[in-house]
Amino acid sequence: MAAIEVIDLNFSYGRNKILNKLSLVGQAGQCVGIVGRNGCGKSTLLSILAGMRKPAAGDIVLQGENACKNPRLFRERTGFVPQENTLFDELTVLDNLKLWYLDSKVLKQELANGQLARLGLAPLVHKPIKKLSGGQKKRVSIACALAANPGILILDEPGAALDLEAKAGIMSYLEEYKAQGGCVILTSHEEQELNLCNHLYILKEGTLHETDASLRGEALVCKF
């Protein structure tokens, strides 16, 4: 059983069709990468996969159940990390986490020896978000997306505007997430992130085409 299966997905803005009969499969323990030119619809696709937008047609099957017929499954089985910062800058890291981790005991355990500890958040909990670096903010955003312990983690350009050390830290965590049976879906143009991918799709003119996951640089760009 696939972690996520997308079947004939369609989406339009008015009369402008953005996504046309898209299909893809992501397995547990694997990463699916989606690449394409700016404005081709990658962010729109990820927001649909996370249940933030409703498709015009098609199905999204999460761990064997159709989430388009039961939207609650999006909240329970996917975690979404958008490219932009959606944290509350005036609040501390801990206060942001409390908005997502409603059980204080679970939050405490996670900070002590769980996923949040592996993301290195324990030393940051009392700092306001506005005082964090870009990489630290991204780690907090990932932590918030993991609150429901989802089996599918969806990330839009996770390394955008981050320094090399921050990118390496996030990639290390995503490798661990995969190794524990999680499915990662991401958009990126960065080689380090694409190296994480077991399957690679190109989004072009509203349709998805699987391509060689080993392609990089000019060889990949030429296919856009």
Image (tube, helix red, strand yellow):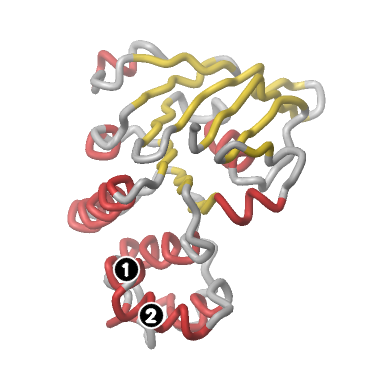
- The amino acid sitting under disc 2 is Gln
Task: Locate residue 9: give its quadrant.
Answer: top right
Instruction: Give the vertical position of 76 relative to 100 (above or below).
Output: above
Q: Which one is in front, 124 or 39?
A: 124
- Residue 138 in the image: state x and y as whole percent: 38, 60
Q: Residue at x 51, y 76 (%)?
A: 96
Q: Disc number at residue 58? A: none
- Decide: few, some or many residues near mark 1? Use Cα within 10 Å; few <14, some 14-19, many ≥20: few
Instruction: Give the vertical position of 83 relative to 18 (above or below).
Output: below
Q: Residue at x 62, y 34 (%)?
A: 61
Residue at which label 2 appears: 109
- The amino acid sitting under disc 1 is Ser
| Horizontal side, residue 1 vs residue 135: left or right | right
Residue at which label 1 appears: 133
- Residue 82 in the image: state x and y as whole percent: 51, 51
Q: Secondary structure at mark 1?
A: loop
- Decide: few, some or many residues near mark 2? Use Cα within 10 Å; few <14, some 14-19, many ≥20: few
Closer to viewer: mark 1 or mark 2: 2
| Horizontal side, residue 208 vs residue 21: left or right | left
